Image (cartoon, rainbow, N blue to C red):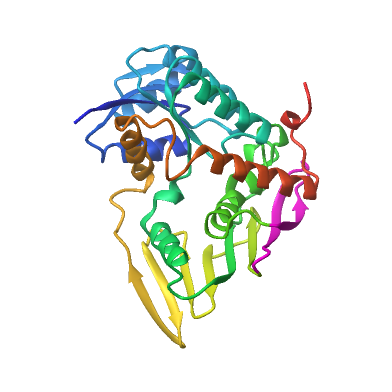
């Protein structure tokens, strides 16, 4: 069994969750972490049992023992840090959103392909059992054609103009942070929409804090998608087929509810061992062991298509990041 030395670039909340799940994987060695703060890197390494820590991202990617770099920095730094890791010959798993816009994602993909290195967006939802089962039901038309999809991700949090969620320069706004999940659902299960309609409410910083989107398809299907930092929801995804409906939540329950002929029943899917991030990490190691340069489950063209759809939504609601402007 080949083992892989993992390195984490960035020591925030998502990095901590990912590090916790690496404990579940025999092939994964928790090797190194890096932060711009030596104290933060040291504390993270101690708390999560990593062998090494660095106060420089450059030092981390130049460590010859690192096999895979997991990038967990803010959205606006993903492209820079992915290119840094790829320039130093490392396989990369980069948190979503992959980049701030399609221009950045194209650069990342071009670099990975030119260097013959593995690159994947860290979209953990793709590997969860209830999503895989849902996709199987859609693909096999178990309940007929999928005609309507509704997916929400909302939470009510305090407004803070200094928080990254509201900072335009950092890719702030609910769309890239949480709205990306409902968009992912529609893109995965219905494909790229033929038309998009989006409207938003804005925070005082100019970032959108609530957004409603409708995707329309030539085959007659519709998707209704919502994200917000100022409202509460169960955060369900519901699929309406010609013969039944299907529903699941964003919670930890790996359970799907089917409503057919006014009778409701549950489909149990395999329970998660940890938080769920280990599934994408395991997949990355499978790909590397099989000498693949991109994931067959989450190919780079899908990530490019996803960011292109997000760009179109931002264009409609007139949200512009500094990274969108020509240098």
Question: Vertical placement of 116 versus 216: above or below?
Answer: above
Residue at the image point whose x is 22% and y is 35% from the top: 26
Residue at the left extreme?
1
The image shows residue 1 at horizontal and vertical percentages of: 18, 31
Question: Vertical placement of 319 versus 57: above or below?
Answer: below
Residue at the bottom extreme?
262
The image shows residue 65 at horizontal and vertical percentages of: 32, 15
Majority secondary structure in the magenta region: strand
The image shows residue 211 at horizontal and vertical percentages of: 70, 55
Compare residues 4 and 72 and report the one nearer the observer: 4
Rendered-image quadrant of the C terminus? top right
Residue at the image point whose x is 54% and y is 73% from the top: 240
Range shown magenta:
194-219
Residue 81 found in image quarter:
top right
Compare residues 325 and 14 and report the one nearer the observer: 325
Residue 315 found in image quarter:
top right
Residue 59 belongs to magenta span: no
Compare residues 237 and 116 and report the one nearer the observer: 116
Residue at the image point whose x is 37% and y is 66% from the top: 255
Residue 119 visible in image: yes
Residue at the image point whose x is 37% and y is 79% from the top: 265
């Amino acid at each position: 069994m080949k083992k892989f030395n993992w390195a984490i670039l960035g020591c925030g909340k998502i990095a901590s969750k990912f590090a916790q799940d690496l404990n579940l994987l025999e092939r994964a060695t928790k090797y190194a972490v890096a932060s711009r703060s030596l104290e933060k890197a040291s504390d993270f390494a101690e708390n999560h049992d990593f062998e090494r820590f660095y106060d420089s991202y450059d030092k981390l990617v130049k460590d010859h023992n690192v096999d895979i770099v997991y990038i967990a920095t803010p959205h606006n730094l993903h492209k820079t840090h992915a290119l840094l890791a790829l320039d130093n010959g490392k396989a990369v798993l980069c948190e979503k959103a992959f980049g701030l816009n399609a221009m950045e994602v194209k650069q990342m993909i071009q670099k990975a392909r030119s260097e013959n290195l593995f690159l994947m967006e860290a979209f953990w939802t793709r590997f969860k059992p209830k999503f895989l089962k849902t996709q199987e039901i859609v693909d096999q038309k178990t309940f007929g054609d999928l005609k309507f999809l509704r997916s929400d991700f909302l939470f009510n949090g305090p407004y803070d103009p200094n928080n990254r969620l509201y900072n335009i320069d950092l890719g702030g706004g609910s769309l890239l942070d949480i709205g990306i999940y409902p968009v992912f659902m529609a893109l995965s299960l219905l494909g790229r929409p033929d038309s998009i309609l989006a409207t938003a409410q804005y925070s005082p910083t100019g970032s959108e804090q609530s957004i409603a989107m409708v995707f329309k398809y030539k085959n007659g299907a519709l998707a209704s998608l919502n994200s917000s930092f100022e409202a509460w929801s169960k955060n369900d995804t519901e699929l309406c087929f010609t013969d039944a409906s299907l529903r699941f939540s964003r919670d930890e329950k790996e359970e799907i509810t089917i409503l057919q002929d006014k009778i409701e029943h549950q489909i149990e899917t395999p329970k998660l061992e940890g938080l769920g991030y280990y599934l994408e990490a395991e997949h990355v190691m499978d790909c590397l062991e099989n000498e693949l340069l991109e994931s067959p489950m989450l190919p780079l063209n899908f990530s490019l298509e996803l960011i292109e759809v997000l760009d179109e939504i931002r264009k409609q609601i007139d949200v512009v990041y500094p990274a969108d402007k020509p240098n």
